[in-house]
Image (spheres, rainbow, N blue to C red):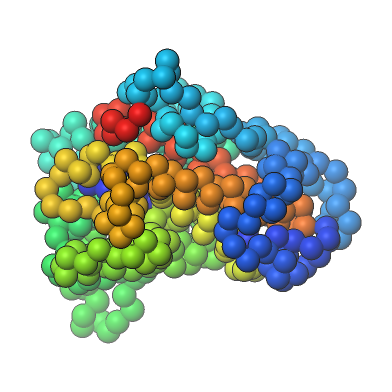
């Protein structure tokens, strides 16, 4: 879900010995994100057990029952062709990333067809003059690439509708198509009631229900959430509502800084981005995959830390790929390179390359702690969920890298 900040854009704690409790795993987590010892010694995600008996847990299904995009391995830094600048569609030089399989073209075509029909016919999402932007978003390719283990098109559509709805809220309330920081809180709160319904008296309920059809963001949220509720368990739906509240809180922090023309400290910006980020997207990987990570496991501090690291890293990918797009837009758009340049000095190039390093450190921490958690608590649904988050992160990078309609890289190489 596209974190706010772009104009239209494994768990935590390292574990103790295998078989230790989730609490013990959390207590053993590295104190610092960049703990090099943890990054160097933790097993790769490809080492997560995929089959066999696990004492106290049972038998882990084989790979067919826990779909994954294959072992996650350390990728080489993106090369710079012939010593020159990267070409359109190339990854960012020096960025840590993993290659992904090309999304299934038949699924991409069908999801693309269905999502456009939903947008036009069911929720009247956009006027005809925005059609090229909708098509350029390539959301079908995006979601198929992020959810390769979805059992069918219907499950993929659950994620795709939510992604589109989140983007239209960003565009219309925050960004290019009429967005403004002024009054954003009221707009977001009322839109949030399409996800988390108002419970009120008979006298006032009809006015609220009517309001849900009053603009494209609320129509999209209401419809996408109805489809999601039909596919999700109550616990999964509550998790998603909570993650969307986090997202909206992050939107409001950025809006407040915009109204006062405040450039946050780097750590303040990163705190905001932990809320205004992609978190609601990878954390529905179990719903889209047709299974459920139990709520008590999802709530463990170790799991929460891994989700946060993955979400933070993948959101900085958005900052990096949308950098030139935002610089070309009116006004000042906060992103990590801009904040580093303003607060720490140095050139724009140096700030951008430092932001790449921040991303890489977060990615290494995510992968190390996810692998360690899976080894310590090899519950099949948790293992699959961690893989799903990792695959989503890789798919998100691939979409940003290859979507040349939206993104281009700065001339820093």
Q: Is residue 73 left or right of residue 285?
A: right
Residue 45 to residue 255: above or below: above
Quadrant for the C terminus, please: top left
Residue 67 to residue 5: above or below: above
Q: Going 18% across and 34% down the picture, which residue do you hit?
A: 131
Q: Going 40% across and 64% down the picture, which residue do you hit?
A: 267
Residue farthest front in this picture? 346
Q: Going 83% across and 48% down the picture, which residue do you hit?
A: 59
Residue 40 to residue 250: above or below: above
Q: Going 16% across and 40% down the picture, which residue do you hit?
A: 328
Residue 402 is situated, as x and y percent measured from the top left of the image, at: 38, 28
Which residue is at the front of the view, 218 or 344? 344
Residue 37 is situated, as x and y percent measured from the top left of the image, at: 70, 53
The answer, for residue 386, to whether it is visible in the render is no
Asked where in the image residue 297 lies, by quadrant, the reply is: bottom right
Q: Is residue 163 left or right of residue 294?
A: left
The answer, for residue 75, to whether it is visible in the render is yes
Which residue is at the front of the view, 321 or 171? 321
Residue 308 to residue 201: above or below: above
Q: Is residue 128 left or right of residue 145?
A: left
Residue 411 is situated, as x and y percent measured from the top left of the image, at: 28, 30
């Amino acid at each position: 879900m596209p974190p706010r900040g772009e104009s239209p854009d494994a768990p935590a704690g390292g574990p103790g010995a295998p078989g230790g409790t989730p609490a013990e795993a959390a207590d053993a987590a590295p104190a610092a994100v960049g703990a090099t010892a943890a990054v160097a010694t933790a097993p790769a995600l490809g080492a997560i057990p995929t089959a066999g008996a696990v004492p106290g847990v049972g038998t882990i299904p084989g790979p067919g029952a826990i779909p994954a995009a294959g072992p996650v391995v350390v990728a080489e830094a993106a090369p710079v062709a012939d010593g020159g600048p990267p070409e359109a569609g190339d990854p960012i030089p020096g960025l840590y990333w993993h290659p992904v399989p090309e999304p299934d073209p038949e699924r991409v075509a069908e999801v693309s067809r269905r999502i456009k029909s939903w947008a036009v016919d069911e929720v009247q999402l956009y006027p005809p003059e925005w059609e090229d932007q909708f098509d350029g978003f390539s959301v079908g390719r995006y979601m198929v690439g992020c959810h390769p283990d979805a059992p069918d098109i219907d499950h993929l559509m659950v994620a795709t509708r939510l992604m589109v709805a989140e983007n239209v809220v960003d565009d219309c309330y925050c960004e290019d198509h009429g967005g403004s920081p002024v009054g954003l809180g009221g707009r977001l709160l009322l839109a949030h009631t399409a996800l988390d319904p108002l419970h009120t008296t008979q006298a006032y309920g009809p006015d609220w229900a009517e309001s849900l059809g009053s603009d494209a963001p609320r129509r999209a949220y209401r419809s996408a959430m109805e489809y999601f509720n039909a596919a999700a368990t109550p616990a999964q739906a509550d998790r998603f509502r909570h993650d969307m509240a986090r997202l909206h809180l992050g939107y409001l922090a950025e809006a407040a800084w915009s109204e006062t023309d405040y450039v946050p400290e780097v750590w303040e910006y990163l705190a905001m981005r932990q809320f205004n980020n992609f978190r609601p997207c990878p954390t529905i990987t179990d719903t889209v995959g047709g299974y459920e990570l139990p709520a008590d496991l999802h709530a463990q501090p170790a799991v929460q830390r891994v989700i946060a690291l993955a979400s933070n890293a993948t959101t900085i990918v958005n900052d990096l790929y949308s950098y030139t797009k935002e610089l070309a837009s009116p006004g000042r758009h906060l992103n990590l390179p801009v904040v580093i340049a303003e607060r720490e000095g140095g050139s724009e190039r140096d700030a951008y390359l430092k932001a790449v390093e921040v991303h890489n450190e977060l990615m290494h921490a995510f992968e190390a702690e996810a692998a360690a958690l899976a080894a310590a608590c090899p519950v099949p649904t948790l293992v699959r969920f961690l893989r799903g988050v990792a695959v989503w992160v890789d798919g998100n990078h691939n979409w940003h890298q290859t979507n040349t309609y939206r993104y281009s890289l700065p001339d820093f190489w």
